[in-house]
């Protein structure tokens, strides 16, 4: 299977993944400096220390902030692929999937599926509570947003999947023979990465349930499908629609979207409402791609 084939090709060289991970994390923080410098230029160095996360996001025009926030992920995606190719001597195809070639149909199915589902849920929410949404369309600002989002959002989500469900999961697979441990660790780390988001600051740590559950969902479909394709498509479709369709002034994505959510957020709804949807999607993927041997693929170690 995929993790086991990578482990066999790397000979258990976990040290390479530790070094590579440190390089990636360091590069990510360095790549965030342009955003920090732009905020300093806008508000002044003396005011920087007074800004919380939301203040940092609101210090610049929304499209500028979004572009500067997403650019570091471009470097992460490129760096992961460079390290895989030259430090680990693994082909990009073998890194992403156990199949002979990357399955773009899987990526497309997952992408289109979540876009349609999220759009359907938005329509239901809008007509159920129209006062919760405010029309926010600005043609010029939205056109710029569309260009930024269509290029950079898929790169941002791909960077997260390549790092967490690809590089980290395969690196941990060098140490742990049972798949449950890479799944647990990468899912929790994925959730922790979002701890600094403004919605966590506003609504509290309970909202971390949402991010950790998403981490488990992405990890499960990666392990069950023996490849990153479904996670790549889903993550890109989800974030792209969010950035373009509806945002709120308390979220990480504060964009010139078509609508603003002006309702009072309920942390319990936001933390747990997606869990039934994720279970339904797991059932759908399982049916479509004929998944079986769940225990072996998620907990123990299938034979390569």
Image (cartoon, rainbow, N blue to C red):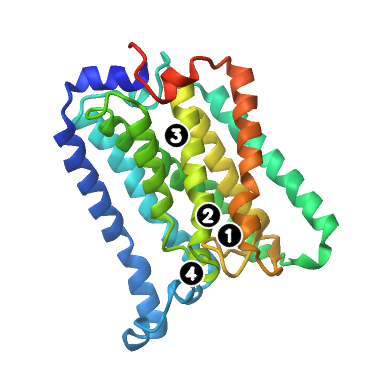
Between disc 1 and disc 4, whose residue precedes?
A: 1
Q: Position of residue 17 (x, y in %)?
A: 21, 36
Residue holding disc 3: 219
Residue holding disc 1: 144
Q: Tell me whether the residue at label 2 lies in contact with that at label 1, contact meaning CB atoms closer than 8 angstroms.
A: yes
On residue 209, which mark appears?
none
Q: CA distance from mark 1 to mark 4?
A: 29 Å
Q: Position of residue 266 (x, y in %)?
A: 65, 63
Q: CA distance from mark 1 to mark 3?
A: 33 Å
Q: Residue furthest bottom?
A: 46
Say left or right for 68 vs 243: left
Q: CA distance from mark 3 to mark 2?
A: 28 Å
Who is closer to the viewer here, 193 or 107?
A: 193
Residue holding disc 4: 201
Q: Nearer the viewer, mark 4 or mark 2?
A: 4
Between disc 3 and disc 2, whose residue precedes?
A: 2
Between disc 4 and disc 2, whose residue precedes?
A: 2
Between disc 1 and disc 3, whose residue precedes?
A: 1
Crowd band around label 4 with a 10 angstrom C-alpha radius: few (<14), some (14–19), many (20+): some
Between disc 4 and disc 3, whose residue precedes?
A: 4
Residue at left offset 34%, top offset 41% = 185
Q: Tell me whether the residue at label 1 lies in contact with that at label 3, contact meaning CB atoms closer than 8 angstroms.
A: no
Q: Residue furthest right?
A: 127
- Residue 35 in view here: yes
Residue holding disc 2: 148
* SS state under label 1: helix
Quadrant in the picture for the C terminus: top left
Quadrant in the picture for the N terminus: top left
Q: Tell me whether the residue at label 3 lies in contact with that at label 2, contact meaning CB atoms closer than 8 angstroms.
A: no
């Amino acid at each position: 299977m995929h993790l086991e084939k990578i482990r066999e090709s790397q000979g258990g060289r976990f040290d390479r993944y530790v070094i590579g991970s440190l390089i990636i994390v360091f590069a990510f923080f360095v790549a965030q400096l342009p955003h920090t410098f732009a905020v300093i230029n806008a508000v002044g160095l003396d005011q920087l220390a007074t800004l919380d996360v939301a203040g940092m996001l609101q210090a610049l025009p929304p499209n500028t902030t979004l572009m500067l926030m997403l650019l570091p992920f471009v470097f992460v995606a490129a760096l992961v692929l460079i390290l895989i190719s030259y430090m680990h001597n693994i082909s990009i195809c073998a890194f992403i999937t156990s199949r002979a070639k990357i399955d773009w149909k899987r990526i497309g199915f997952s992408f289109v599926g979540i876009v349609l589902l999220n759009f359907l849920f938005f329509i239901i929410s809008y007509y159920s509570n129209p006062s919760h949404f405010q029309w926010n369309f600005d043609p010029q600002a939205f056109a710029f947003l569309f260009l930024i989002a269509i290029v950079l959002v898929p790169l941002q989500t791909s960077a997260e999947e390549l790092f967490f469900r690809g590089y980290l999961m395969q690196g941990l697979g060098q140490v742990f023979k049972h798949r449950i441990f890479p799944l647990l660790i990468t899912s929790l780390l994925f959730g922790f990465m979002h701890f600094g988001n403004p919605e966590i600051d506003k609504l509290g740590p309970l909202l971390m349930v949402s991010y950790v559950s998403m981490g488990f969902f992405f990890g499960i479909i990666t392990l069950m499908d023996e490849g990153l394709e479904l996670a790549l498509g889903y993550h890109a479709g989800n974030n792209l629609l969010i950035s373009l369709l509806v945002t709120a002034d308390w979220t990480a994505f504060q964009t010139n979207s078509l609508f603003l959510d002006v309702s009072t957020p309920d942390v319990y709804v936001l933390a747990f409402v997606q869990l039934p949807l994720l279970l339904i999607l797991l059932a759908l993927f399982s049916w479509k791609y004929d998944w079986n041997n769940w225990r072996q693929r998620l907990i123990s170690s299938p034979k390569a």
